[in-house]
Amino acid sequence: MKHHHVLPTLVLTTTAVLAAAPAAFAAPPSEPTPSASTARAEIPASDAGSVEITKKDPAGDVLSGATFLLLDSAGQEAGGGTTDNQGKLTFPDLAPGIYRLKETASGSPLHEVVADQDVIVTPGATTRLTITDPFKAAQVVLHSKDDKTGKLLPGATVNIGTGDSMLLTLTTGPGGTASGELPVSSRKMEFWVKQIKAPDGYDLYKPSKTFTAGPGAPVTVTVTNAKTATSPKPTPSDKPTSTPSTPTAEPSGSQTSVPKPMPTGSSKPGDDSSPTASANQSASASPAASAAPAGDSMPTTPAGSLAHTGSDAIAWIIGGVGGLLVAIGTATVITTSRRAPAEAEPDNNETS
C-alpha cells in the first residue's frame, strides 16, 4: 500500500516541470542595447564630421600637454585628449551638431586656460580651431617709502602701464603697501610706474620709473618720497615789529632841497620864516660880512651844488668868528710893533 502512494506523487511532479518548460523556451530572445561606439559606427561616413585643435600661446609658440574635453548638446562626453608636440588634437567621427569645448589644463605653469566655447560640426567637414592660452598675470607689489628713513607710507597712488596704455592703478594702504595683477602678453615685458598722488606731508615723486615683469612671477615696485619742506613759524611778540620813523636832520652833503641863503641886502629881514633862512640871515650880519669891501655881496650857492643844512650854517658862523679873532689879533701885533719905534725916536734925538 505504501508503494502505490509514493509513485503517483513522483509522476505528477515530473509532469508539472515538463509542462512548464516549453513555455519558457517559447519567449523570443531580447535585443542588446546599442553602445555609444556602435551608434558612432552607424553614422554614415558622408555625414560624420571632426574637430581639429591647434594650441598656441600669445607669442605664437605651440603648446603641448594641454588637455581638452568635448561635450555633446546633452552634456555627454563625445571625446577628449591632450595636445601633441605640434600642439594638435583631433576629435574624429562626430555627428553633425553643436558641441561644447572645455580646456581642463593648459599644461604650462606660465599660461591660463581659455574659457569654454561652442563648436559647430558640419557633415563631412573638419572644424579647425586655434586656441591661444593667455599668459598668467604678473603679481605686482607696490611699496611707498620715506627717502630718508625707509618708513612705509600710506596714501601713495601710482599708475602702471606699458607704452601708451595705462593698465593698473594702485594706492598704498595703512601698511604702506598695495598689490594687484598686471596683465602680460609676452614672457618678459617692460612697464612704467608714475606717482599721481603723494602721501600726506610729502612731495610728489615726479620721475617715471620702469621695471620688467614676466607671466606668473611676483615683482616689487618701490617709490620714495621726500618730506615737504616747511618754513618756521614766526614767534609771537607783544612788541611791534617796526618802530615809527622820526624825522632826522639830513647829513651834510645830502641832496635835500633847502632854501638858498639870500645875498646881503637882496631881501628884507623876515621875508623867509624858515629856520634855514634865519640862520642865513644871521650869517649875513656877522662881523666877517661887515669886514667885506663895500659893494661886495655874499656869494650865492652855485647851481647844482649841495644845499646847506642848519648844521653847516652854524659851522660857517663859528669859522667866521674864528677868522675875525685871528684878524683882530694880527692887527694888534702890527699896531704894537709900529708904536714901539715911534716911542724910541725921541731918545735918539736927545742923544744927538
Image (cartoon, rainbow, N blue to C red):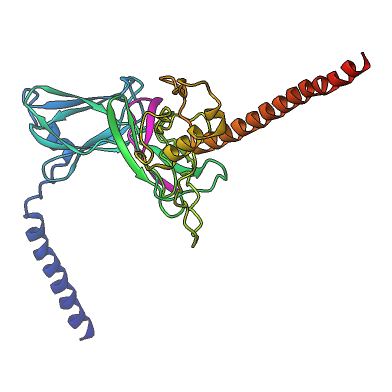
Q: Residue at x 61, y 34 (%)?
A: 321
Position of residue 166 measured from the top left corner of the image (x, y, whole percent): 28, 32
- Does the segment drawn in magenta span residue 187? yes
For this rendering, which residue is in front, 187 or 177?
177
Position of residue 50 measured from the top left corner of the image (x, y, whole percent): 15, 26
Q: Main secondary structure of the magenta part?
A: strand
Considering every residue shown, the one lying at the far bottom of the view is 1
Considering every residue shown, the one lying at the far right of the view is 351
Tell me which corner region of the image, top left, top right, bottom left or bottom right, holds residue 203.
top left
Tell me which corner region of the image, top left, top right, bottom left or bottom right, holds residue 196.
top left
- Does the segment drawn in magenta span residue 172? no
Position of residue 289 measured from the top left corner of the image (x, y, whole percent): 52, 28
Q: Residue at x 56, y 26 (%)?
A: 291
For this rendering, which residue is in front, 94 or 155?
155
Q: Residue at x 22, y 81 (%)?
A: 3
Position of residue 278 measured from the top left corner of the image (x, y, whole percent): 44, 40
Residue 61 visible? The answer is yes
Specify whether 80 is left or right of 51.
Answer: right
Residue 108 visible? The answer is no
Specify whether 31 is left or right of 290.
Answer: left
Depicted 6 relative to depicted 174: above or below: below
Specify whether 316 is left or right of 7.
Answer: right
Depicted 158 relative to depicted 176: above or below: above
Quarter containing the N terminus: bottom left
Tell me which corner region of the image, top left, top right, bottom left or bottom right, holds residue 99.
top left
Q: Residue at x 37, y 41 (%)?
A: 270
Depicted 188 relative to depicted 104: above or below: above
Considering every residue shown, the one lying at the far top of the view is 352
Q: Magenta segment range?
A: 177-196
For this rendering, which residue is in front, 33 or 207?
207
